[in-house]
Amino acid sequence: MLELAARNRASIVTVENLVKRFGHFTALNDVNLTVAVGEKIVLCGPSGSGKSTLIRCINHIEKHDAGRIVVDGIELSDRMTDVNGIRREVGMVFQSFNLFPHLSVVENCMLAPMKVRGLSRTEAHERAIGLLSKVRIHDQANKYPGQLSGGQQQRVAIARALCMQPKIMLFDEPTSALDPEMVKEVLDTMVELAKDGMTMVCVTHEMGFAREIADRVVFMDRGCIVEEADPETFFRAPRTERARDFLGQIIH
Amino acid sequence: MNNLDFSVVIQAWPYLWSGLLFSLALTAVAFVVGLVLGTCLALVQHFEVPVLGKLVRGYVALMRSIPLILVLFWFFFLVPIVLGHLGGSGRPIPIGATWTAFITFGLFEAAYYSEIIRVGLRAVNRGQFEACQALALSTFDTYRSVILPQVLRVASPIILSQTIILFQDTSLVYVLSLTDLLGAASKLAQLNGRLVEMYLVIAVVYLAISSAASQCVASLRKRYAIAGLRR
Amino acid sequence: MFAVLLEQTADGQRYIDWLVSGLGWTLALAFFGWWIAFAVGVVVGIGRTVQNRPVAALARLYVEIFRNIPVLVQMFLWYFVLPEILPASLGNAIKQIPPPWGSFFPALVCLGLYTAARIAEQVRAGIEALPKGQVEAASALGLGGYPTYRYIVVPQALRLIIPSLTSEVMGIYKNTSVALTIGLMELTAQARQISEATFQTFTAFGAATLVYLALALIAYQGMALIDRAVRIPGTGPADDAVRPGATHAIEPIDSLPDAMEVVK
Ligand SMILES: Nc1ncnc2c1ncn2[C@@H]1O[C@H](COP(=O)(O)OP(=O)(O)OP(=O)(O)O)[C@@H](O)[C@H]1O
Ligand SMILES: [Mg+2]
């Protein structure tokens, strides 16, 4: 039923027969994935299965070798003149935060809106403070990334991406570089974002999070999508052997 | 020990002072030109611009392999010829030792600064580039607002110590008979025969300026180490 | 283009012989100067790290003085000033030293002691970069101060600083050219002399430049060889080539290696 509902909505990302190689190594092999507007997808799978590669292809940080990727109605290709036109609409949050260490928290959030969206300094500042309060960190706005905890840094990174008002957010293991006690604050932020209706693709192994917000769990192994299901089904009764092994491992 | 008479130094002070000003001016100009040009050279290499990248590499390697004095001789000889060709007449345009010094130091220092910045560029975490891509920043904005500020900041202690060495190296314009601090002292020493006092005094001046500057750099280094840009 | 180098000079040699003799002085100065610099530099560098206050202060004073006065001024101090401020008899004896040696020895002492100050700083940095655990482990084994330095600290620190030492080797051979200001006919001086005698400036400087380039290459290769020869097995060199689009990430750095700071 959920899948049906998803299909009826307009899709924002369509991936068809995607192939990505690193030299002779095939990291993604014939991957198909559609993300509907407002949909929340959790990507999981063993290390090296190609999860990061897949979402990095979606905003063209990695360039794919074959197949089609359409984002927001525009097809990604090498000949594309304005890749930034797509990246503007796609927010990304990295495992290692990648905040700019020489800029204060609020400046981290203001840079791209000013340079890319052409906002004035005051507009950008206003928007940045607004989104920083949304991730509950506006009181640290003038500190530098190096002065914040990991969880705080990751929330800043989320606010920074949101400042571009993206149509979709990509998360690549946003909590796996964090100490356990900080994971929750970041997940809470993401849950809130999901409830606001943001379209999200998250690589994560946080099953509680997946259960709470995911419309679909996509399980990858060795460069292929092996199984797709709603979270309840996936966690309770995975169809494939590989998914069962994987779940067994992460639950211990 | 002969009787030293430092009163000659007091008489000579205005002349030494003007020499010192020349040394400082040469340092400042070479610093600015060297850093700006050096950054460009570093970027050309960093982006592996076809042909030009290789040329720049060769230029930097050459400058770093030969003594500054020889470079001064080269430029004293070459710059008028090159200018002549650029001017179209084909005849050398003599530009004098002062201009030679400014041009040589600017171009020479650029090679050294560019090497510092090039290594700094390589050391920037790849995640920084990816974050810029994800935020749709243009290449120009990426480098101007994110990458270069970090590189310059990380490299600033080394850039500054390099500049202190540059200040000391300006004394080599002595071989072009210019009147920098050392040149002034040596000319006076020939006039009044008081070379012991002259050389000792300017040694102290150089020492004072350089070590004061080194102290500043050291405290800067410490501040950065404590502030810890990254965790 | 280099044919002129084979022509006869006024003194019955060929110009190329002038270059070779200049090269000889350059090499002699760099080689012997290097060993002075290395010996003094290691001692002073260790001195800067010891607990003994007066020793550390003295070592620091040495570094401050020799690093912060331009080489050329130091050259003049050794050559012109030293004989004047020594007791007259000794000063005169120094002035009596016959021509090439009268310039060579001051230049040697000057370059040796100047470079020593720079090496001392590298040695100190190398020692301070060692993990504390090394000294603690040594004292836990009952090693005293001297054996700890001799067998544990210094051997590791020297390996660490080989890249910086490479740039000091390059520095000293380039600085030999400063000796021309006190009349030593080393390579650059000979090139200038040939240029003045033949008006073939391009050829004269070009030949000297090629020789310096070759020396730089040899110095660089030599140090790389030493680096490989003394490397501790299991401690490979870090590959730090990262460009946008390169395939592997590296650790962020907080400061650039000190080896980047070089003399000219
Ligand atoms: N730049 C690259 N060059 C070469 N191989 C790469 C590169 N990036 C990824 N790979 C390889 O592609 C495969 C998929 O990598 P990817 O990072 O997508 O895995 P992942 O599912 O995100 O794993 P993890 O859970 O460890 O993050 C891996 O085997 C990896 O070694
Ligand atoms: Mg990954």
Image (cartoon, coloured by chain):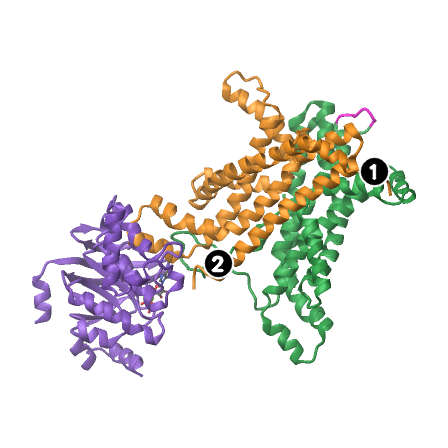
Chain colours: A purple, B orange, C green
Outermost bottom residue? A252
Name which residue lies at 78% across and 25% down: C8
| Magenta stretch, residue numbers | C7-12
B114 on left or right of C244: right
Check the image and name the residue furthest to the right.
Answer: C89
Question: Which quadrant of the structure image shows residue C79?
Answer: top right
Labels 2 and 1 in the same subunit:
yes
Q: What chain does badge 2 belong to?
A: C
Location of mark 1 (residue): C100
Q: Quadrant of residue C95?
A: top right
Is residue C119 found left or right of B7 in the rendered image? left
User: Ligand 2 is located in which of the four quadrants?
Assistant: bottom left
Is residue C239 visible from the viewing direction of this image?
no
Mark 1: give few (<14), some (14-19) or many (20+) Cα within 10 Å: few
Above/below status of B188 relative to C88: above
Residue B4 x, y percent position in the rendering: 81, 39
Give the left or right position of residue C153, taking residue B191 as reference.
Answer: left
Q: Is residue C55 above or below residue A239?
A: above
Quadrant (top left/top right/bottom left/bottom right) for the N terminus of chain B: top right
Q: Residue at x 59, y 74 (%)?
A: C133
